[in-house]
Amino acid sequence: MNRNIIGISAFYHDSACCIIQNGKLVAAVQEERFSRKKNDPDLPVNAFMYCLNEAGISIADIDCIAYYEDPVKKSERQLWSGSQQISADSIYEMDPKHVTQQIRKELGYDGPIKIYEHHQSHAASSFYFSGFDSAAILTVDGVGEWATTTYGTGKNNKVDIFEEVSFPDSLGLLYSTITSYLGFKVNSGEYKVMGLAPYGKDIYLEQMRELLHLEENGQYSLNLKYFDFLRGKRMYSDELPKLFGVPVREKDSEMLQVHMDIAKSLQRFLEETMIKIANYLHAKTGEDNLCMAGGVALNCVANGKILQNSPFKKMYVQPAANDSGCALGAAALAYAELYPEDKIEPMHNVYLGPKATEKEIENLLNATSLEYDDCRTEGNALEKVAKKLAEGKVIGWYNGRMEFGPRSLGARSILADPRVLDMRDRINAMVKKREGFRPFAPAVLEEKMYEHFDIDHPSPFMLETCQVKSPIDMPAITHVDNSARIQSVNDHNPRFQKLLREFDKLTNCPILLNTSFNIKDEPIVCTPEDALVCFITTDIDCLVLEDFIIDKEGNEITMLEMINNNFTERGRFELNPNVYTFI
Amino acid sequence: MSRPSELHKAAATDLATLLPITEENKQKAFDLMEKLGYTKQQKEEATTTSDDPFKSHVGIYKPEVKDGKKYYHRDILLKDRWSYFADVQSIPPKSDKKRIVLLGESVTRGFLLDPEYTPAIVLDQLLNSNKDKFGYELVDLAETNLGMAGIKERYTQCMDLEPDMVIFLAGNNWREDLLIEIGESQDKQEALQERIQGEEGIAVAKPLIETYFSSIVDDFLAYVGDISKEKNVPVAFAIPEFNLLDCRSTPGERVVSELPYEKLKTWIEAKESAENHLASGDIDICISEAKKMVEIDPSHPYGFELLADCSIKKEAYKEARYYLEMARDTALFCRTNSKPRTFKIVQETILAKAGNHGIEVIDLPAIFKAHLEGKVPGRDLFLDYCHFSVTGIQVAMNAVYKVVLEQFNDTRSLHKDVTTIVPSNEVLALGHLFAAIHNAHWGQSYDILLHHCSESLSKWKDIAKTMVYYCDMISRGAANNVCKSLEKILEDNTKLDRYVHALVPARNMKNMELELVDAMTTVLKSNGVDITNYLLKIRLDEHNIKNRRINLLQNYYHATSYDEYQGQKTAFLQARDTSSDFFFVTDAKSNAELCISLRIPRIINENDEQVTVCVNDTEVTKIGVNSKWQTYTIKVPSEALQNGMNVCKIKWPLVATTKEDQDNNSSTAILDAAFRVFGEICNMTVSGM
């Protein structure tokens, strides 16, 4: 008889659902991909139905639903915080049972529901899928119930947390505060600060140290006079610009050197702090392996530094390290609790979402006015795509099951030749509409990665940076400090691997620029139709839907572009960009 | 920001464990809230109001002073809203003509004929022909989708245009304002919840809802009257009318009420009996059964509609009108996102109270009734639920015209014949085509769809191509916005910019629109264009179940209109009527396999309840059902299938169930308690071998 555990994260940001069936993670997806609402916080009803369908079960077959956060403890913290987002009236409307009621009502589920704590879910999401028998576990994010950072271990199929840092002291909130101060959106602009840092100098390190004080036993505290997130309006107080002597940067205003210097100082300070707390964790646990999760674990630059500068020998960062990944952790905790004798399979890849059949793609294309190349009979799609890439074309790449987590890893990707001098600017201008300073990431054939990058282990999830040592000049993926955020590609994505090989055959370059297949402020594409609309409304040169290739050249798309730019609902939903989602 | 006190952690923990706050722990919770600094009288933080860049605008129009005169031009920053307004670039400075401002919503825009033919165009032509004293300048400020709050704002803004008179034709969108009012008032919600606790269902709440509604309408009239007096600008208010005869309740509006088992059983039996007797011509028995229905559940529209149909057959138009008004007003119970309409209580409040506020009333329902010699208004005066046909616009504006003349003592002796002010045949054809599409999207009958398709093609033969493209587009699984056929429609018709949204449904809302496609196919065929085989081929290419598993819970395979139940949304399908239909396509050359997981929630006594599964009106099997999810795989023999479209019907048994637990935190609690769930399906697929 099958063992089916559903994991859910919701009502915060990045809601998601997954299913572990007989110890194997068989499906996981964020709700935003279906609802097309970026960071959708609602109960993931579409993701839930997809998971059931993928596992071939109905609601009656679910053994347990695991939820990623304790609503009572979260309410405690919210009530204690004195946030001005909370009023007496709103307290009368608070009901921690709402979570289970909604799960029962909206999902039609009447079986057992298990609730796990937020950071416990983060920790489990990393450990159970790492493949390690034992490991130290570090989780760092904005805030869960009370915890913002936790220290723990995983062994004997169990996760134990032995120390935690509590709200409002939070490395994640520090990072988000500076993100907001630098004119970027909280909850999404943190990556941009990380990308901006290499352009600056760390001349504000002292000021950073004024913001956060490290203490004993992995503890630290924020100097709260510089922060204002409890009021729920903005992250920083008026004291913060005074500390740096730099006014708050207005959104979309000119990026000055001081802003880059602040970003660099923040990044350096984060790295320093993370290394110190990782060393503390190692001293306490003596483990060789480190598992990490939480939003801060998506800071790939810091991750690399931790591994280099701590005694840990191996590190595993769960690819959906943000709150969406908590669904995995909660499910794993429930699975381990219900079936302690059964081991959960490591997560070898992130291709856990929906895919489309050939027939569905063919029908879609036949409904359109677009001319396309059907390569199914000749089986030469990858050769053709590689040729187009070598010609400098920008490709929208739809391949197999969608990735789980925030990174595009060769299933829903925009691909291009990394050697082309102006490719970064072209892609930014034609699709991403994002800041020009941000580098794109390379995807590299795993068997050839060591010839081009200074790293000694595979990096399949694009969660580490390393130095570029390639003889090939690759300006589109090489950052100003000669670093790159790499994804190594192996046979877990055979089609993408084969494409890289074909490109290598033509160019002697086993590397492609790989960025997420979406437009700014929209979720990554999910269906072939999403991909098609993105292709139509941007300047992507060519769309590849499995074995079907559609070129812009030769297709007249003016009318389609007009329709899809003006008469479809897109990107209207947004979380509060000024403050972390506490409530 | 200061660190909250560590001492308060225990209080926060205690308070969190008390949640949700109940009558029993209210005092304890209050004490803890006080300790934590939360009090009822928390002061609102002073909000800094930024400069509103649109504060001197009138709608989309931005003022610009040139040579000492104030012009208003459409603001490019508001381009997204231009198509909601008249297609007029600028409003010139006030001249020596009498300036009339026309305010309103989509009815006032002339939706489906706008911008080529609108109430303002007709009124302007009437006023400025045969004039012997002074001229008139009409400023058309009507805006599609405008509600009560919006129209108040527009009314205040329009005073900057120095009008000599303001005319309102509005009130169809005011249910939303009522819902906002109730949603913002805990007291009102509790009062409503208290009313519907008993066994009478939600219908008992009607007087209370009407009291609230009347109150906000009266407040609106007072607001308008005060400004009218202050500015010394006369106001006339034209009360809208509803397409009583030809706009009937949608599938969503027929969601069955939650009633005690015996009452519900009687209601369902009466409904089936009434339908059968109406079909066989036994009018009196039908009336008797329908009266049983409305007696048991006056919140449901269908009994009233059956009574109206019987009354019309008897040529008893007064009774028919009464029943159709009652049916229309059941939208007050908010089963679904009902389309705009005026309600009896709104009409009556305006008639009773407008005079007190110095507002002249133009009673369009009475004027239409007189025009129809006592008959009930329908497709003759309307294109859909509330938007006027050409005749409707003519009759309404002729009435407004007379009030304007009276206001300015304009005693001209000659009047232009309003029936001579007509749109082109192309505009008419497109108007009727989009009326058909719009009516289909909102659940109207085949008969009315056929009427509009037929009218459309009779006015302009070239529209045939658009119909073919529409059928092609809608029969494909792809979203309309990527379909070649939509491109063709837009290339062939350059006057569609205001209506393209009707061709691009919201994500995942597309359905097969089978009745509309049938209506278009029929009309095309009668004009020598037969697309039957063409459509069959598309449907088989796109949707044939052969070697595929089709998820019938996708909107495309079961929805028949855009209206949606307004209560709690669920991941699974909730059947809110006695049967549920699903559509699938097969070449019928082999058997089909149907997989279904279903339950009936909260059954009191679990007996051997059974659901009947039919395909194309033939019973395939009966399957057991109880309050737990159960999964079945059913073989459907090829003999039961037909080449092309097939209908699978799930017939639910009526079972005594308990009421749903109330989730007080849920904004939909009232609705979820008020309406019945006959059964639930969490998985339903069909595949061909």
Image: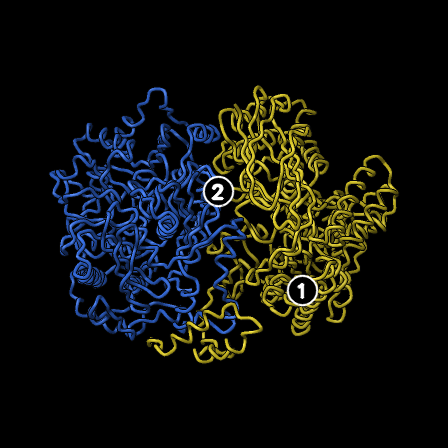
Secondary structure, mark 1, is helix
What's the mark number on residue B192?
1
Please state the chain letter of the residue tagged with numbered disc 2 in the rendered image: A
Please give left or right for residue A435 compared with residue B396 in the image. left
Q: Position of residue A28 (x, y in %)?
A: 38, 44
Chain identity for the colour blue used in the image:
A
Residue B597, position as x, y percentages in the image: 55, 39
In this view of the protein, which residue sits in the foreground, B256 or B129? B256
Colour of chain B, in one word, is yellow
Residue type at tag 1: Leu
Give the quarter of the figure containing the N terminus of chain B: bottom left
Gap in Å between the C-alphas at discs 2 and 1? 39 Å
x, y percent for residue B481:
49, 38
Give the residue at mark 2.
Answer: A61
Crowd tier of the residue under label 2, counting other residues whose Cα lies within 10 Å: few below 14, some 14–19, many 20 or above: some
> Mark 2 and mark 1, same subunit?
no
